[in-house]
Image: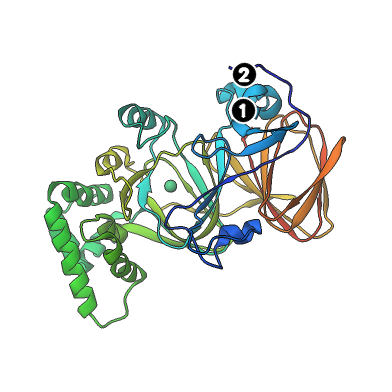
Amino acid sequence: MFKSTRSDCMPYRLFNSIQHYSWGSRGADAFIPRLLGIQGELEKAYAELWIGTHPNAPSQVIQGSERISLATLIARDPDGILGTGVAERFNHQLPFLLKVLSAAEPLSIQAHPDRAQAQRLHARDPKHYPDANHKPEIALALDRLTALAGLKSAEDLHSTLLTYPEIAGFIGEISADSQDIFSAVIRRSLDVPQQLSVASQQLAERLKQTPAPRTEVENLFLALRPVYGDADVGLLALFLLNVVHLEAGEGLYVPAGVPHAYLQGNIVECMANSDNVIRVGLTSKFKDAEALLEVLTPDAGTLPVLRPEPELPEMRYTTPAKEFELRRLDLEAGAQLKMPARASVQVYLLTEGQISVSWNEGAEHYACGESFLIPARLPVWQLTALEKTTLFKASVPE
Ligand SMILES: [Zn+2]
């Protein structure tokens, strides 16, 4: 246990880690290096920037002459950094993880467990489920985001099965319920994997022979088949989920048990502090179809597109999550804001522009891609936009 030491009353600049998952953007145009103003390595994929205390990649801060993990800073003074209420409610830990995510290629088709399921999965398989927490998440598009989100309605699934008899043939008897149709495809992929390969192959051959223009999902299916192979049930699952296109500023909130996949785009993401991902397909990582069937919710249907509500000067994205709330601030050059004291922690990330932050004892400059934490103990502070600036703020709902 750390000895409790009172933290300094100042904003903390955050030094964050980058995850180089294979689906990240790469090359001269890779989004995350551009955002951070750094020279990326051309052949490396830049997938995610993690801002928080998750043990897989905790952010670091400077305290005095020491560079320490943000988790250590919080452990030394949970009340001063998090605020008493948040510290009490969330076991003295930062309850959220903020990310920038840049997908050049599709992420796996996945779902996240609720808290009880996460505890079970973590106890059973700690290697693949690294913590016991749930992972509700919000994704906000920075440009355009293409994603698969939630199961199609029963009506849409029935017409999908008519259009793609290869999938209908694969599952055999067809239920009236959309969750059952999705589950049947996943279940059959475990029971009769050879037939899954045959169905994918037949579907691919028919699509290639059909001259008509193909749908977005058909093109995706044909493009991903050589990457993952016919034995990957994600190829058929593509046809069973809703395709959504988000414009900059729009978002998705993904609760537990809803299958989804981000296909392409750059987003700001905030989630409960967890890395529990149950993957079912479109990945070379560990797949766990059994666990996915366990967590699938009966109302895993269409996810509404989130649009922010103005609560000026902020734009607020409302979700039911208890661990986080995400807001956006769009500031014109020269804009000055007096930021009121708040009883709990806030984390800011700049995705455009630059600002100066001043408080009674000093001032700091933050550029695009940089982030900082405002401890609960800091009283009033001031923010000045040095040029047109966009900031995201993650905090805990009151
Ligand atoms: Zn997810």
Does residue 204 show up? Answer: yes
Q: What's the residue type where badge 1 is placed?
A: Thr
Whether residues under marks 1 and 2 lie with C-beta atoms below 8 angstroms apart, the answer is yes
The N terminus, quarter of image: top right
Q: At which x and y percent is residue 395?
A: 64, 38
Q: At which x and y percent is residue 221?
A: 30, 66
Left or right: where 114 falls relative to 252: left
**Residue at 20% from the left image edge and 63% from the top image edge:** 200
Mark drawn on residue 92? none
In the displayed structure, 73 sits above or below 265; it is above
In the displayed structure, 15 sits above or below 132; it is below
Q: SS of the residue at dot 2?
A: loop
Q: Quadrant of residue 386?
A: bottom right
Disc 1 designates what residue? 72
**Does the beta carbon of the residue at mark 2 sit less than 8 Å from ligand 1?**
no
Q: At which x and y percent is residue 163?
A: 22, 68
The residues bearing labels 1 and 2 have C-alpha atoms spaced at a distance of 8 Å
Q: What's the residue type where badge 2 is placed?
A: Phe
The colour scheme applied to this rendered structure is rainbow
Q: Quadrant of residue 342?
A: top right
**Residue at 65% from the left image edge and 28% from the top image edge:** 73
Q: Residue furthest bottom?
A: 211
**Residue at 22% from the left image edge and 49% from the top image edge:** 186
Mark drawn on residue 2? 2
Left or right: where 263 falls relative to 166: right
User: Total marks drawn?
Assistant: 2
Of the image marks 1 and 2, the number of the one nearer the N terminus: 2
